[in-house]
Image: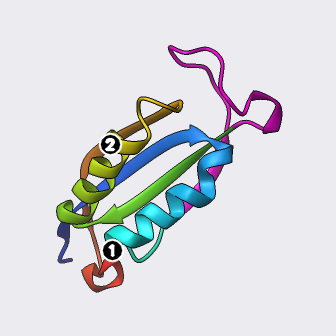
Amino acid sequence: MNTHPMILLTLVAESILKDRLIHEIRSAGARGFTITDVSGEGSRQRRVSELLGDNVKIEVIAKREVADKVLEVLQKEYFSRYAVIAYMSEIQVVREEKYF
C-alpha cells in the first residue's frame, strides 16, 4: 500500500474560538478538519469563555505549508490572547489527493 507524508495539526482552544479557527484553517488552504468537544485544564487554569463551554480540539491533515500558515496566524493573533495550544505530528496517509 502506498502512503504519503502529511502533517496532522492539532489545536485545542476555547470553544468560543471555534468559528474563527475554522476560518483561519480554511483560509490557509486546508480542505477539511475534525472537531471534538473536549475538556481539561492547562497552565492558565481559567479561560475567557469559562461560562460558555469547554474546549474544542480541531485536527487538520494537510501539507506542511498549510499547517505552517495556520501556526503563523495563531502565533500572531491568538496565543497571547487566548487559551490555545497547537502541535504537529508527521503522519502517513493513504489517498493523498483527499487533503489538497
Q: Where is residue 36 in the image (x, y as percent from the top left)?
A: 63, 51
* Residue 84 in sight in this render: yes
- What residue type is disc 1 on? Gly
The answer to which image quadrant residue 25 occupies is bottom left
Question: Tag 1 or tag 2, which sits nearer the N-term?
Answer: 1
Label 2 element class: helix
The answer to which image quadrant residue 88 occupies is top left
Residue visible at 67% across and 29% down in the picture:
48
Residue visible at 54% across and 19% down in the picture:
42
Q: Which of 80 and 45 is in front in this view?
A: 80
Q: Do the residues labelled 2 and 1 touch (CB within 8 Å)?
A: no
The residue that disc 2 covers is 76
Q: Position of residue 62 (x, y in %)?
A: 30, 66
The quadrant of the picture occupied by the C terminus is: bottom left
Q: In the image, 51: left or right of 44?
A: right
**Magenta stretch: includes residue 43:** yes
- What residue type is disc 2 on? Lys
Q: How crowded is mark 2: few (under 14 residues within 10 Å), some or many (20 or more)?
A: few
The quadrant of the picture occupied by the N terminus is: bottom left
Residue furthest right in the image: 51
Q: Nearer the viewer, residue 78 or 85?
A: 78
Residue furthest bottom in the image: 97
Check the image and report above or below for 96 versus 25. Answer: below
Q: In the image, 53: left or right of 77?
A: right
Residue visible at 41% across and 33% down in the picture:
79
Residue range of the region highlighted in magenta in the rendering: 34-54
> Disc 2 and disc 1: Cα gap in Å?
18 Å
Name the magenta segment's main secondary structure: loop
Label 1 element class: loop
The residue that disc 1 covers is 29
Q: Where is residue 6 in the image (x, y as percent from the top left)?
A: 22, 63
Q: Where is residue 22 in the image (x, y as percent from the top left)?
A: 52, 63
